[in-house]
């Protein structure tokens, strides 16, 4: 008597083993997928908090850049700048007193420019960092209204970038 072995039961065992491995693999990766259940294009609560914090900080930086302290420096700088232009345009190089006067105006112009730069530079650098981070994470993405409301109601801002 000749016995033939078919792949019937063995093939079924192989199929069941492959199916079991696939189920185990899916089960192992499911928790990772379940952690971020936020729909594509939407920010999660933590990301929304960061975006709201950055928006508020950007508003404050803009307020500081346009505030009275820097505004007064701008006004004085522009006044001295115009005065210097007029002085250069009408300068008589043979008049020593006039040359010294233009030199003093020029020194004041330089001093004001340095003060203005010192006042603005840290704020501008901060603004660039905030805008860069905001654009990376927040631009073009949606936020759930409940996350926005929670972020505005009780801001828990992450460390500044």
Image (cartoon, grey):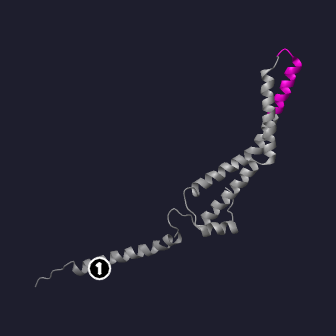
Give the number of callouts. Answer: 1
List x then y, in percent, for residue 117. Answer: 76, 40
Determine whether, in the image, residue 105 is placed left or right of residue 160: right
List x then y, in percent, for residue 39. Answer: 50, 67
Can residue 115 be seen here? The reply is no
Quarter placement of the C terminus: bottom right
Quarter placement of the N terminus: bottom left
List x then y, in percent, for residue 58. Answer: 69, 54
Q: Which residues are magenta?
A: 93-109
Q: Residue furthest left?
A: 1
Res 98 quadrant in image: top right
- Residue at x 89%, y 20% (from the top left corner): 97
- Residue at x 70%, y 46% (from the top left corner): 124
| Residue 101 on the magenta segment | yes
Task: Give the prevailing secondary structure in the magenta stretch.
Answer: helix
Q: Which residue is mark 1?
A: 13
Whether residue 46 is situated above or below residue 63 in the rendered picture: below
Res 54 quadrant in image: bottom right
Q: Nearer the viewer, residue 127 or 17?
A: 127
């Amino acid at each position: 008597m000749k016995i033939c072995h078919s792949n019937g039961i063995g093939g079924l065992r192989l199929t069941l083993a492959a199916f079991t491995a696939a189920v185990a693999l899916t089960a192992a990766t499911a928790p990772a997928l379940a952690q971020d259940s936020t729909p594509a294009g939407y920010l999660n609560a933590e990301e929304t908090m960061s975006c709201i914090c950055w928006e508020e900080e950007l508003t404050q930086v803009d307020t500081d850049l346009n505030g009275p302290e820097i505004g007064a420096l701008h006004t004085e700088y522009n006044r001295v700048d115009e005065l210097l232009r007029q002085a250069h345009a009408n300068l008589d190089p043979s008049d020593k007193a006039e040359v010294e006067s233009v030199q003093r105006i020029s020194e004041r112009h330089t001093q004001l420019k340095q003060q203005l730069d010192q006042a603005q530079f840290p704020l501008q650098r901060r603004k660039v960092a905030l805008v860069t981070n905001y654009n990376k994470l927040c631009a073009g993405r949606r936020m759930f209204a409940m996350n926005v409301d929670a972020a505005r109601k009780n801001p828990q801002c992450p460390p500044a970038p």
